[in-house]
Image (cartoon, rainbow, N blue to C red):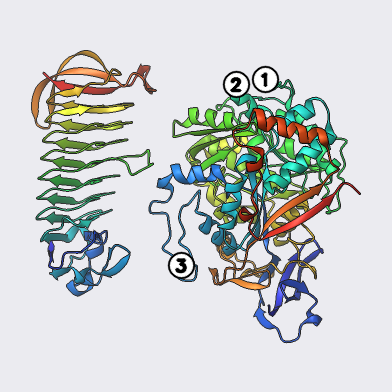
Amino acid sequence: MGELLIRNGFVFDPLQGIKGDRMDIGVKDGKIVETSALNSPKTIDAAGMAVMAGGVDIHSHVVGPKVNVGRLFRPEDKLFKSPHKSPTCSRMEMGFSVPSTFKTGYDYARMGYVFVNEAAMPPLHSPHVHEEIRDTPIIDNAAMPVFGNNWFTLEYLKNNEIENNAAYTAWLLRATHGFGIKVVNPGGSEAWGWGLNCEHIHDPVPYFDIAPAEIVKGLIETNEFLGLPHSVHLHCNNLGNPGNYTDTLESLKLAEGYAPKNDFGREQVLHITHLQFHAYGGDSWGNFESRAKDVMDYVNAHDNITVDMGQVTLDETTTMTADGPFEHHLRALNNLKWANVDVELETAAGVVPYIYSPKIKVCTIQWAVGLEIALLSKDPMRTFVTTDHPNAGPFTRYPQVITWLMSRAARDATMKTFKWLERTIDATSIDGIDRELTLYEIAQMTRAGPAKALGVGNTYGGLAPGMDADIAVYALNPEDMPSDPTMIEKAFSRCAWLVKDGIVTVRDGEVVEEPAKRTVWVDVKVPENAQVQRDIYEHFLRHYSVKLDNYSLFEEHLHNPRVIEVDTTQ
Amino acid sequence: MKTVTLTLTKPPELMLEGQNITPDNFAGKKAAEIAALDVWEGKQKGPLGKYFTVEGDGGATAAETKIVLRGDCTRVKRIGQQMTAGEIVIEGNADMYIGGWMKGGKMHVKGNVDSFCGIGMEGGELVVDGDAGHHLGASPRGEWRGMQGGVIRVAGNVGNDTATFINGGTIVIGGDADIHISTHGEGGTVIVKGNTKGRVGGQMVKGDIYIYGTIENPLPGFSMVGEVEQEVDGETARFAHYIGDLGERHPVSRGKTVYANLYTRI
């Protein structure tokens, strides 16, 4: 591999506290090095441009069975919306809200992203997840198995057996080659098997007789017992309903008293994802309103919590979640097609198309809530840009979201298209917020912050020597920012350069090279636990449709792994 | 109005994807430029002139352009796809997707067409003198927003799945129709002057169907509410009036539940 010198750019690296200084970045053998270590590098002239680490997406649904259900049952998502094959890419691209794996990889690269965390992997279907990871070019992927409705987890936590739950968690992470603990509607998706839901954190799960609050606390304890890179990653109960902010605040309070314990620089014990869907007031769609301020006041005051936005982008999109009962609820609201899946002892899933229209009051309030969350945040290192792709909008709208955050004029221009502008302003505080985020804050929210929260801040999200040479250069001059906000969107949509692992991958917004991508997973060593081994054996014998021997991911499914090792036996 | 005449001189071995054959694409172009437009035979792209001789130039706008297709176009698909104005006359048969996603203008096919013709139609007029295949005026696969407007007239018979998810517009069928008419319909009108096999109006929420002949297997979700005299397609007749599909959700407008209407001629 060669040497590269990225010269004269305005460098934004929050992990090192570099705020737009004019600097050179050296690259050698796929790693960032001191420029003095270079002999005869090729040069990229980044004068007048912003240089950041490659983007890190903490929460996106890009691979796996539920994404594929979305692809299969929405052929109309591809019709007249798929570009012709790019002459510089090796594969065709298809789809808008649920793009093909190839389009996913290319589009993330074009936006300057290099790491995407798949937000929900049904453990039983981990082979499918890993096969799609293999087929998603360029970007490194990790995938979080879901634990919040898993029978093993529910049983161990009911009996307060944290050590056993930790041993099971370690086993499942290895079996699925997963990354961390994802929790979706804890207890609620299991209750869905009885046609019920857990809307509040003290609603008992049928049969298991455990409440969501106990599941979340137990999993936080498990996570810190193991010292995993990432924290518990929670999709709260009662998603999407008016008045749910009280449930969200109760969920947030579950993290009180817990401190992070890990060797990866992570400082939170709980990540709340797509907070936008969980910050609603009112008690009906009629008096639906934003409670982003209440929720963000709590988040701002508590350092052991991180959040991501789940920004509504006002597009026609495809919702997909392991929150089975929610998708059934959504289907009844919009009368569109619905897919519903039960995954044996582990989880459920649903898929429903959804149109976020600027003509509908609830949708425009949702749009405002997402932006309020980011704009009311006091710590951009704990608040991350996502659209919960594809639930609130496709990830290809990140540049648009960044533009809304950086420009009041861009927000005003979008708000002018709202049919219910006055009511949206009355129900939210968006019109009273003048804050415009800086490029440094955007770098915090889109790379440094998520990388640190995921516990991969030593490899991704920064530009310190020794880290992966993942570097995005955007045609934006911080000393002469464009007055037209659409230019910001354009710059973030198609980066001027993306270097991935030291290889020039994107040039002038076009993918020119497809470097090898990786699967990032966490291997946890725990002491032998005979009871857990027996429980796993018994459950597979009695309840699973597959044999234990066929359950774990076979080596041939795992593509170019990067293992993060955690040893709890020391 | 200027006329461009395309004569198929070298029939394709595979099906030809002819979505560029529209007044919109021909407008403002000379004959030679039209002959250079892309068509696809399988995965191979070639100029239109490889298959057709082109006579005459396009008009200044789509509305001032008329296209006449001669020769056996049985293997040419997607003629008039997404056209917004102007006129197309196909002297003989044509293949699938004729007039798909039409927004305006007029198409006249003097022979038969295959399946998926007039799908996703938003406006304009599609007239077929012969028969049509399946999915006439239906929604594209997966799409729940079907035909929005316009008129489709087929003089002969049609296949199954006519007008799936119809939202607006009118389809008039001179002959018989196979199973599934206006499935999931939420508006629009389908008139069948011949007989139908069955599953007429399944899961229909709103809209009208007129059947002049018989329904071999009527759906149990429709209930007769009376007899009415109505003018349909220029002639007045008496019909038995059914409402349905009673198994489906129905919107309420001004305090009254809205049903789909099925009329069978007495």
- Report the side of A324 relative to A381 (left or right): left
Q: Are marks 1 and 2 on the same chain?
A: yes
Indicate the position of residue B100 as horizontal and vertical percent values: 26, 49
Q: Secondary structure at mark 2?
A: helix
Disc 2 chain ID: A
Q: Secondary structure at mark 3?
A: loop
A246 and A36: which is toward the camera: A36
Residue at the (33%, 31%) spot, across then down: B184
Q: Which residue is mark 1?
A: A206
Residue at the (57%, 64%) spot, across then down: A110
Badge 1: residue crowd in 10 Å (few <14, some 14–19, many ≥20): some
Residue at the (71%, 28%) spot, across then down: A247
Badge 2: residue crowd in 10 Å (few <14, some 14–19, many ≥20): few
Determine whether label 1 and label 2 are within 8 Å by CB.
Answer: yes
Q: Earlier in the sequence, mark 3 or mark 1?
A: 3
Q: Which residue is mark 3?
A: A86
Which quarter of the figure has residue A185? Answer: top right
Determine whether label 2 and label 3 are within 8 Å by CB.
Answer: no
Disc 3 chain ID: A
Which quarter of the figure has residue B217? Answer: top left
Q: Which residue is mark 2?
A: A194
